[in-house]
Image (cartoon, rainbow, N blue to C red):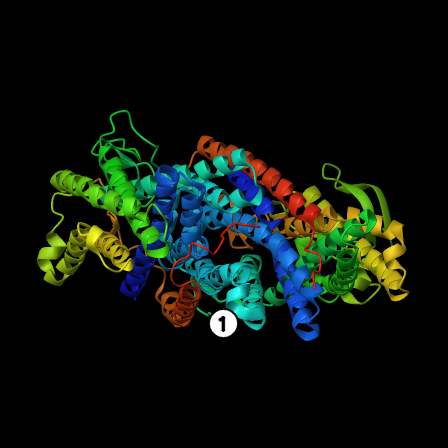
Amino acid sequence: MEDMLFYDRIQFAFTITFHYLFPQLTMGLSLMIVYFKWKFLRSKDEKYNDAAKFWMKIFALNFAMGVVTGIPMEFQFGTNWAKFSELTGGIIGQTLAMEGMFSFFLESSFLGLFLFGEKLLGHKLHFVTGFLVFLGSWASGFLIIATHSWMQNPVGYEILANGKFVLNNFGALFSNPWLWPSFLHNQMASVVTSSFVVAAIGAFYLLNNKHSQFGQLFVKTGVVFGLISSVLVAFPTGDLTAKNVVKHQPITFAAMEGIFETEEGGSEIVLIGQPNIQDKKLDNKIAVPNVLSFLTYQNWDQTVKGLNEFEEENYPTNIPGLYYGYHIMVGLGTIFIGLMAVASFFLFRKKLYKTHWILWILMFMIPFPYIANTMGWYTAELGRQPWLVYNLLRTTEGASPTVSSGNTLFTLLGFVGLYLLLGMLFLILVGKIINKGPHPVKH
Amino acid sequence: MELFWYLVLMFMLAMYVILDGYDFGAGIIHLFFGKTEKDKKAITSAIGPFWDANEVWLIASGGVLFFAFPTLYASSFSGFYLPLIMILWLLIFRAIGLELRGQVHNRMWERIWDKAFGIASLLLALFFGIALGNVVRGVNLGMVENGVSAHEPHYFFLPLWNPTFDPMAEHQGIIDWFTILLGIIAVVILTMHGANWIIFKTNAAINSKLKKTVFRLNFVLLALIIVSLSVWHIIDPNPFRNFLEHPWLWIFPLMTAIGFGGLFRVQTFKKDITGFLCSSLFLFGGFASTAASIFPNLLPSTNDVNPSLTVYNVAAHEYGLGVGVIWFIVAAILVGVYFFIQHKVFKGKMDDVGYGEH
């Protein structure tokens, strides 16, 4: 029984982690492609249209990866989490079915037109199809996070005698206080990823003395989008998301921050340290007094509840994982703001394209927004444990009753092998597109 | 209310069968008839801008199943665990075969992805036919042994096969002689359907050969249908009960027959679309007839202990289903608009779209 749940969880975690490497780029990148296309329509400068076309190629490859790794996600609710699906399908099925009907049809119908219809449609309609693809991908994000928010903070439901959750207020799913901050936080984080990728490829071209005109455009666009989005991802969206955790899941907040014991007279903020679950303390801790109380309540002296105030059976099941996930996300987010601020300063002084040390850093930053996004999701998901539906349905009660651990391990191994292949193919092909670069301006 | 969602779900699944069905068929044709580079290009161009949107009908059907009939979704997806995950893997291979082929100009690379696309399409057609066979045959709900349920009455799990391949064995498998028969029928009809789509959407050199193939395969299909109808009573002793009670249901077998008859005349059609319409009619009629023959069951039980899963005992709660109707109608209108725009822009022959070239 233990093994079964373990493999079910690992399979979901593995497949969703891999899947989300792609949509986090495409959601942000679709916005930036629409921006390039819009600049082209305004200025008639072919450079912008070529930039849009170049990023569309990378977008198409990422989108295809996102689609093929996304379908297993919808199936796995039923295959591996049948009990959870049976009990809550009337509610989370609602938002997931809406995602299929409102977003996937929109995206898939217009993606074909966007990728192959430029000549047939003309530039204005081509811009419109690009905008619709952007709209579809963000609608998809919204409906997924509406589903996620219901699991974190269930609203608009009642529980029948047979244990089934039924919806009694459709509107509540979308006015859930958890939804809007999380959605905007996630979308801004997605723009962070795409900005860093665009800037990194631009830096690569400049450092290589290849496609320099595009190198400059990409670095500039990436840095400007990057500065705005890295600030917005922290304030106000990240801040509001954290305040939701404090309010609705105080025990999760204590574990994220690594507070084992309540501190009277204001809580310190932990910068570094390793959770020691056995002794219920942090080892090798570096902390700043009273700052956490201020960030949480805007009051230096207010108490933040520690884990000691809660029942142990409701502790998040992986406190160190949760703590590290959260700290890595916040740490990287802080570095992103600092780096983009410095880069923006050099851009403003018109020195950025020649300042090689910043370009090198920008280029090597590529993996870090992906790590930050993933760690953010680990914080959210590990933080919800040991619950599937917060405070109402435990993770141990949600798995499929008839699927044995051997079968789950079989499919898990299959997914690992297949995704390894997909990942390698993706890297080879995206490397090829980047190396070839955008078409030079002919006119 | 359940009935409304049942009709929606069946309609969406039928759309999936018709639309992604021609993609699978095109893949099978690609595997067996795609000899020259030009023919291969014509085949992939004919489905290139559509397959992704066609696949969405499966995802959206899954979503509607999850939302409207959560118990059925939970029961069948966990019970058919292995084949469903394998279908996912095949869908991945089909997609990357199509999308990655044109990314590198190298003969070996192209051959690998050609085969991946073709073989995955063939196996998908077979698997979906087998899946339909499993639903018609029913499963041992609750995993009853010696009159006692080992699980809750709506849960089950099937291994891929049992040693006897007998559909009536106590320990069933996904693959038995009955389900494999439906799988083969699915491969044959979808091959014809895909050929009809290629004839409709391209001016490929192989089109006249494909017409001949459709004509010949129709005799194979006839033989397979006769075999399946003559053994059907073993699976379901009384498949016509709903048709006798509600004679208007005969419209579905009638549609199948008209489509089927039309396919014998495929070589004489003046318009290239007619063959495709015939096979679509056949698929729609066949799918609807099968669904109607087991109604109100959605997944029949093969034991006497636990009841079959029906439209009425697996549906979600009334309020959720009601509120869903409103957004669904809005979404359905939008989907219709997208479908219209997509097929208007990419109307006519597709040979020169240049799909997959970068």
Seen in the picture, residue A224 relative to B185 is either above or below; the reply is below
Horizontal relation, residue A388 to residue A429: left or right: left
Q: Secondary structure at mark 1?
A: loop
Does residue B139 show up? Answer: no
Residue at left offset 58%, top offset 41%: B104
Chain bearing tag 1 is A
Quadrant of the rendered image containing residue B155: top left
Residue at (44%, 60%) from the top-left corner? A97
Q: Position of residue A179 (x, y in %)?
A: 59, 65
Say how many tags the image has: 1
Question: Taking A270 as reference, is B154 left or right?
Answer: left
Amino acid type at circle 1 is Gly
On the image, the x and y values in percent for residue A49 come to 66, 64
Residue B148, placed above or below residue A52: above
Give the residue at x 38% y 62%.
B348
Q: Residue at the spot x=44%, y=52% of the render?
A: B45
Looking at the image, residue B35 lies above or below residue A236? above
Residues B173 and A192: in front is: A192
Residue A407, picture quadrant = top left
Residue that lies at the very extreme toward the top in this rendered image: B163
Of A84 and A132, nearer the camera is A132
Quarter of the image where one finds residue B318: bottom left
Which corner quadrant holds the C terminus of chain A? bottom right
> What residue is pinned by disc 1?
A171
Residue A265: horizontal and vertical position, in percent?
Answer: 84, 59
Q: Position of residue B322 (x, y in %)?
A: 36, 69
Q: Residue furthest bottom?
A: A42
- Residue A33 shows up from this direction: yes
Which of the pair A284/B219 is nearer the observer?
A: B219
